[in-house]
Amino acid sequence: MKWMLQALLPLLSLAAHAGELRMLTDNHPPLHFQQGERMVGFGVDVVQALAQRSGDTVNVQLRPMLRALRDAGSDDDTAVFTILRTAERESRYQWVGPLMRTETALYTRNGDSTPVTDLHQTRGQIAVPRKWLVYSYLKQQGLDNLWGVDSPEIMMRLLQVGRVQYVVADTMSVGTFAAEEGLALDQLRYQMPLMHQDAYIAFSPKVDAAQVARWQQALDGMKRDGSLQQLKQRWHIDQARYRSTKD
């Protein structure tokens, strides 16, 4: 009997983990970021709440976003959050959302340049991470002053030392990115909006469609009972727009 139990243990372990969803995301405060050994943030709280309502077990893992998108497009029991839903991505995933609406904007150092209302008015380099969707959008505008970088940290460092005149970030995260490089939020000037888009959870096409539907129903329930709005308020999602000068 002992040898039979030992032989069954691996199978029991697999059964215990069957159905666990691997939820992939990157470092993007306040949506999702690592705090000690845990992932926290608005998106993490939403995912955990939806899993509880759906009766699913989730394992939130930190991944570079491009890798997370690739894995969620092909692997079993895998999803990526929070990402923008685009025409190019539409058929690659199953979608749950929207979780929130985002604004991506153009910023300068406060006092460094005259107000900008059109991208072609910019004078100097615009730094933006190449992995961000807004980088592709800006390339399509035919700009000759776009500087693609590897990370938001590099982008803010270039602004701090005066190598670039403009940076691009969503209005929720710009303050955190700036602070990590020693820039106070009031040192930045909001110039103009670039993109307004909704953020979603994207599930692998290999995830059971009925399971994805349960998650959408759970999210709809969170919207109806106000719990999604409570999480937005907790993480200041709706109050994230910033201007350094009053209109």
Image (cartoon, rainbow, N blue to C red):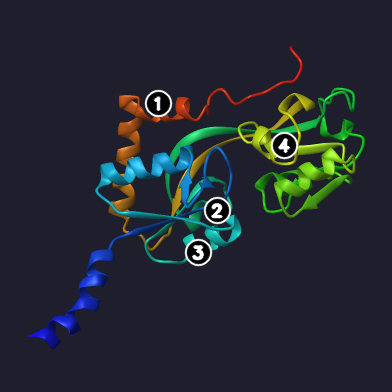
Q: Residues within 10 Å of mark 3 (few under 14, many from 20)?
A: some
Q: Circle 2 sits in a helix, a strand or a loop, which is it? A: loop
CA separation, marks 4 and 3?
30 Å
Which badge, 3 or 1, is on the more N-terminal residue? 3
Q: Which residue is mark 3?
A: 71
> Which-is-in-front pick, marks 3 and 1?
1
**Residue at 34%, 50% in the rendered image:** 212
**Residue at 42%, 30% in the rendered image:** 231
Q: Circle 3 sits in a helix, a strand or a loop, which is it? A: helix
CA separation, marks 3 and 1?
31 Å
Q: Which residue is mark 4?
A: 178
In this view, which residue lies farthest toward the top?
A: 247
The front one of 210 and 44 is 44
> Is 11 left, or right, of 241 in this rendering?
left
Which badge, 3 or 2, is on the more N-terminal residue? 3
Does the residue at mark 4 contact the one at mark 3 (Cβ under 8 Å)?
no
CA separation, marks 4 and 1?
26 Å
The front one of 99 and 40 is 40
- Confirm whether residue 82 shows in the render: yes
Image location of residue 19, percent across then percent down: 28, 61
How many marks on residues?
A: 4
Q: Which residue is mark 2?
A: 89
Which image quadrant: the C terminus? top right
Of the residues shown, which amino acid type is indicated by label 3?
A: Asp
Q: Is residue 83 above or below residue 170?
A: below
Res 230 label: 1
Does the residue at mark 3 contact the one at mark 1 (Cβ under 8 Å)?
no
> Is 109 left, or right, of 8 in this rendering?
right
**Residue at 32%, 60% in the rendered image:** 20
Of the residues shown, which amino acid type is indicated by label 2?
A: Arg
Which badge, 2 or 4, is on the more N-terminal residue? 2
CA separation, marks 1 and 2?
29 Å
